[in-house]
Image (spheres, helix red, strand yellow):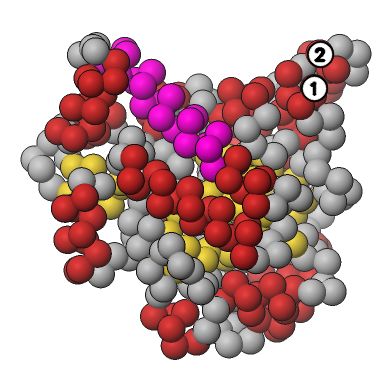
Amino acid sequence: MRRFLTSAFLLLLAAQAAFPATGLESHPYTRLHPMPPASATREIRAVWEQSGKGLYPGDWPRTFRVLKANGITDLFVNVGGIDFAHYASKVLPRSMTCRTNGDQLAACLAAARGTGVRVHAWLFCFNATRPTAAQRAAFEKKGWYLKDPSGKKLTYLDPSNPDLRWTLLRAAEELARSYPVAGVHLDFVRWYERPAFAQATPEVWKRFRAERKSTSGKVFAEWRTAKISSFVTAARAKVKGARPSAWFTVAVLGKYPSCIESVGQDWKSWLNGGQVDYIVPMNYTSDTAKYAGFVRVQSQSRVHARHTISGIGVTANGMDLTARQIKGQIAVARAAGLAGVAFFDLDDTLLRRLSAAKGER
């Protein structure tokens, strides 16, 4: 544990030396947003909840008692995607969970009252993880799917498709307008990880050539990035237009700048332009040195650091972080001046690890 804290302390000293307090007023993000949202008066300690039903389906109050007992300040609850809605949506298809067990976002928000835990509606964007056969057929007919070189459909969808983009923007606006959420949290705001696959989709390539009058791979990569950034800008406008107080946050790949080339996510430009309130980089690794490297880049500017919530992948991608590893990663994020951390994801394993971390020395 001592080496974790030593690394964290060195990170903090480096950040302070590189970015003195004077001159921050000239930073473009500072001019747009001098401070984080007023409600973020303490370190953010968030958690992603994937099921959309809470730890105990049918008993959201019990989930919030557990969250509060573990010091959780913010909940990203997965309530929708292009192929499902666990809430009473008029834009997205309502899920079986919603139809049989009721509006999960409404129940979640009702249970959150008085607990001090903020609720953020987590929306999947360019990935369809649970479509019905009829939905798959409809999506293919609309040209929403990306395909691999053999023509096989991927679960990833086309971020350049105007109809798909508009549907998702309407869903983001609906969540902010119809529910008193603390924020809207977007996920899968990216292209598939292998650009060559996107190029193999005729609809994407045709759209690119029509818009840029080019067949250059370099220009194509720039176009892909521009499509993602313009979607983020439009989504923020929809969310803030419907509920100005709502946080607008986006889950991103943590490794920068390689994420620009791989998936079109130029999240530093989003921060500089004030397009997001917080990025939530998925810094998923069990290697504390590698984790510290991600955080070092994310905290190169103190302005960026204040608008970054570091994702800790406790059980992500088959990982199983120990209590000591969790505590070490929290220490690194805290020393670097980040706004807080977010744990993936809410289950019994996470709760056991968090409980153990409290006693870890």
Rendered position, 123 above or below 115:
above
Numbered label attached to residue 31: 1
Q: Does residue 231 show up magenta in the picture?
A: yes
**How crowded is the residue under tag 1: few (<14 C-alpha within 10 Å), some, or many (20+)?**
some
Task: Report the front residue among 355 and 162.
Answer: 162
Residue for point 85% across, 17% down:
25
Compared across the picture, whether 146 is left or right of 295 comes to left
**Residue 151 placement (x, y as % from top left):** 10, 43
On the rendered image, what quadrant is the N terminus found in?
A: top right
**How crowded is the residue under tag 2: few (<14 C-alpha within 10 Å), some, or many (20+)?**
few
Hey, which quadrant is residue 109 in on the image? bottom right
Residue for point 60% across, 41% down:
236
Residue 2 shows in this picture: no
Compared across the picture, whether 207 is left or right of 23 comes to left
Q: Which residue is mark 2?
A: 26
Magenta segment boundaries in residue numbering: 217-236
